[in-house]
Image (cartoon, grey):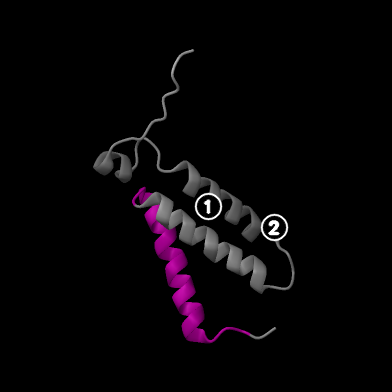
Amino acid sequence: MREAPPAVSLMLAGAAVMSGLLVLAGLWTPVAASVGALLELWIVVSRTGLEGTPIFLTAIAASLAMLGPGAWSVDARLFGRRRIDFPDQ
């Protein structure tokens, strides 16, 4: 399997760092976590050996993208906390 050019590797590493910083800050959480999940999935697909860490990080990032930001995140402060209320039956 061929190695990616250095410019592409640097761009992917920069996207991963920015995605991680946005998730850490709790800003644009669904978008940042989706980008992180796609980058980790790319690592799983592009390498020949299956390593556990990228697979685990893909699952965590995808779960975080679906769950959304927490109560103390910047997203919750800026846009309000979203809740799903089920009616009593």
Which secondary structure, mark 1? helix
Magenta run includes residue 25:
yes
Residue 89: % across, % down:
49, 12
Residue denoted by label 2: 52
Residue 50: % across, % down:
73, 64
In the image, farthest residue toward the front: 89
Magenta region: 3-27
Within 10 angstroms of label 1, few (less than 14), some, or many (20 or more) residues?
many
In the image, farthest residue toward the top: 89
Residue 18: % across, % down:
39, 63
Give the main secondary structure of the magenta stretch.
helix
Q: Nearer the viewer, residue 33 or 53?
A: 33
Name the residue located 37 percent from the left edge and 55 percent from the top edge. 22
Q: Nearer the viewer, residue 44 or 86?
A: 86
Quadrant into which the N terminus falls: bottom right
| Callout count | 2
| Residue kind at label 1, given as amino acid type | Ala
Q: Is residue 51 above or below residue 8?
A: above
Which secondary structure, mark 2? helix
Residue 41: % across, % down:
60, 63
Dividing the picture into quarters, in which one does residue 83 lie? top left
Q: Earlier in the sequence, mark 2 or mark 1?
A: 2
Magenta run includes residue 14:
yes
Dividing the picture into quarters, in which one does residue 40 lie? bottom right
The Cα–Cα distance between marks 2 and 1, rounded to whole angstroms, is 14 Å
Q: Nearer the viewer, residue 89 or 78?
A: 89
Q: Is residue 31 above or below residue 12?
A: above
User: Which label sits on residue 61?
Assistant: 1
Left/right placement of residue 87 relative to residue 53 reads: left
Name the residue located 39 percent from the left edge and 57 percent from the top edge. 21
Within 10 angstroms of label 2, few (less than 14), some, or many (20 or more) residues?
few
| Residue kind at label 2, given as amino acid type | Gly
